[in-house]
Image: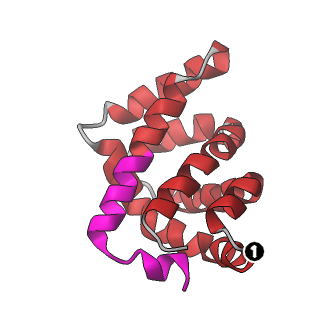
Amino acid sequence: MGLSEQIKDEQIQISIAEDCAKLMDEKVAMKTGISGLAIKTAYRALKGIGPGYIPRALQNLVPQALEALDPMWTEGLQAGDPVEHLSQNSSKTADILLGVTDQKASKAQNKIVIATYKKVRNSVQGDVEDAVPGLATILGNYTNP
């Protein structure tokens, strides 16, 4: 059964978004140096849009992200552990997730979101790859792999 089929329940998707927001908070807080400062500034700008903006934005991404990750998840099921498969293929997983956010950003109406995304997009590949094991664990917590 595909990932998107296993996680159809809206409440579960909300919980996944909330868990992912916490993961993002942790990952951003750990950033250092000039690039870390840029990421923290961009993240603060997004959070400044309104209370709960990040979890709500992630909630809007969850259904498309689950669908986009279906083939990788299925490969992982066939290999015996989809969570480990996503983690071991963090670069490919990150590419898939960034493809979803690219598509979503191209349709965004909020100028802060558009400007912030454009500023950080080219530099976040590694950050997303670093977050993939945490994301994979979150997804594993809500599925029966």
The residue sitting at 62% across, 50% down in the picture is 132
Question: Which quarter of the image is occupied by the C terminus?
Answer: bottom right
Disc 1 packing (10 Å; few <14; some 14–19; many ≥20): few
**Prevailing secondary structure class for the magenta stretch in the rendered image:** helix
Q: In this view, does 143 lie above or below 120?
A: below
Horizontal relation, residue 131 to residue 49: left or right: right
Q: In this view, does 80 lie above or below 45?
A: below
The residue sitting at 41% across, 53% down in the picture is 58
Residue 62 lies, in percent from the top left, at 44, 63
Most distant residue in the left direction? 51
Most distant residue in the bottom direction? 1
The residue sitting at 66% across, 40% down in the picture is 130
Residue 26 lies, in percent from the top left, at 48, 31
Residue 134: in magenta span: no
Residue kind at label 1, given as amino acid type: Ala
Pointer 1: what residue?
A: 79
Q: Which structural element holds mark 1?
A: helix
Magenta span covers which residues? 1-20
The residue sitting at 55% across, 82% down in the picture is 2
Q: Is residue 42 above or below residue 89?
A: above
Residue 5: in magenta span: yes
Residue 73 lies, in percent from the top left, at 63, 72
Q: Closest to the observer: 77 or 45?
A: 77
Q: Closest to the observer: 53 or 93?
A: 93
Q: Is residue 12 above or below residue 78?
A: above
Horizontal relation, residue 104 to residue 11: left or right: right
Residue 129 lies, in percent from the top left, at 69, 46
Residue 109 makes an appearance in the image: no
Question: Which quarter of the image is occupied by the N terminus?
Answer: bottom right
